[in-house]
Amino acid sequence: MLGLIGLGRMGRAISLNLISKGLKLNLYNRSKEKLEEFREKANLFYNIDDFVKNTDIILIVLSDTKAVSDIIKSIPDQKIIIDFSTLHPVFVEEIKEKYKSYVSSPIFGGPKDIETARARIVFGESEDFYQRYNLNFLEYIGKVYFVNDSVKASAIKLASNFIHGVFYVLSLEFNTFIKEFSIENEIYEIQGDRPIIDMAVRYGKYYDKEVELSFTTELMAKDIEYARISAHSKNIPFFITSSAREFYELAKRYGLSTKDWRETWKLFKKTYS
Ligand SMILES: NC(=O)c1ccc[n+]([C@@H]2O[C@H](COP(=O)([O-])OP(=O)(O)OC[C@H]3O[C@@H](n4cnc5c(N)ncnc54)[C@H](OP(=O)(O)O)[C@@H]3O)[C@@H](O)[C@H]2O)c1
């Protein structure tokens, strides 16, 4: 029997997608009210031990390492666990020591991509493992990339997220600068064909706008911190990413935690007003 733990934005979207394709699902979530939406659609469990007893393949979609640590201690080590949460390699390595059939499978793309099967799943095991346990249903969510290594899978996800998050801060500095000096038209005309300016300008389209929620500032702050922890585990100096971490932490303190991460331009308004 297939089951899923964690009905946040991602877990909800994955569950709705799989149920719409005719799959039977066991569901568990820490806050019980999130189960109610699935009353007519899935088997609901209000107790983690009952859920685990009745589930062979467990999909996990939780916020962070703390949430996964809290939950995984209730799961025996022989279960098949496919974890879509974005974690960091040091943590994944520790889990893999105990749980041989634990697969870190972070996802690129948000709830809308999951709905339309356009997500990308970085599967930390082999295609052979995938076929052995009939995991083909993952293709309902999106394209599956086999990287055959859970630690690498988590590093791939972090590498992409931290470069986006860090570059966005730089683009905000750039966009604030060109606005304050009223040089937007001139810089585009004279230098707009340069790749770095082009990228900064593209991110500038979110400036001064309410951005539809896709990925929260809180999650971006977490991923950047996880990238920093991972870099330090390899003795990589991480100057710029560490500064970006301060930026997103400040954004959280300014009340932007649950807003889309691209709304952090608001921090520049606060600084300049
Ligand atoms: N949102 C995106 O666009 C996106 C895209 C790619 C990857 N991801 C990754 O996917 C994961 C989930 O993201 P999300 O947006 O679905 O997050 P979310 O909406 O904040 O949901 C988080 C889930 O984790 C549960 N949780 C948190 N702490 C817990 C604990 N200590 N014990 C048990 N359960 C706990 C929450 O349960 P409660 O309901 O009880 O709070 C909820 O089910 C994250 O690792 C994120 O980085 C997200």
Image: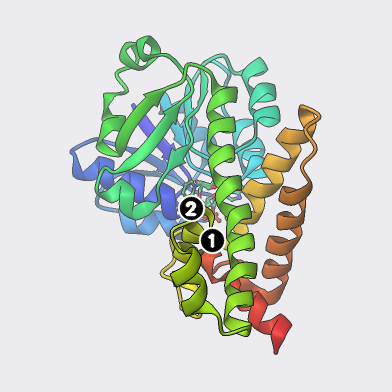
Residue 272, how many percent across, how many down? 71, 85
Q: Is residue 86 visible?
A: no
Label 1 CB-ligand 1 distance < 8 A: yes
Amino acid type of the residue that numbered disc 2 sits on in the rendered structure: Pro
Instruction: Read off the residue under disc 2.
Output: 195
Q: Residue at x 48, y 52 (%)?
A: 195
**Distance from the alpha carbon under mark 2 to that under mark 1:** 27 Å
Between discs 2 and 1, the one toward the N terminus: 2
- In-front residue for pair 129/119: 119
Residue sticking out furthest to the bottom: 273
- Do tag 2 and tag 1 residues touch (Cβ < 8 Å)? no
Q: Secondary structure at mark 1?
A: loop
Q: Residue at x 43, y 55 (%)?
A: 9
Residue 58, how many percent across, how many down? 44, 30
Residue 21 badge: none
Amino acid type of the residue that numbered disc 1 sits on in the rendered structure: Thr
Q: Residue at x 46, y 20 (%)?
A: 147
Q: Which quadrant would residue 255 be assigned to in this image? A: bottom right
Q: Secondary structure at mark 2?
A: helix
152 displayed left or right of 222: left
Residue 80, how many percent across, how many down? 46, 21
The local crowd at label 1, few if under 14, some if 14 to 19, many if 20 or more residues have their Cα within 10 Å, is some
The local crowd at label 2, few if under 14, some if 14 to 19, many if 20 or more residues have their Cα within 10 Å, is few
Question: Which of pointers 2 and 1 indicates the residue nearer the eye?
Answer: 2
Q: Which quadrant would residue 220 be assigned to in this image? A: bottom right
Residue 216 badge: 1
Quarter of the picture holding the N terminus: top left
- In-front residue for pair 225/46: 225
Label 2 CB-ligand 1 distance < 8 A: no
- In-front residue for pair 223/30: 223
195 displayed left or right of 3: right
Residue 156, how many percent across, how many down? 54, 32
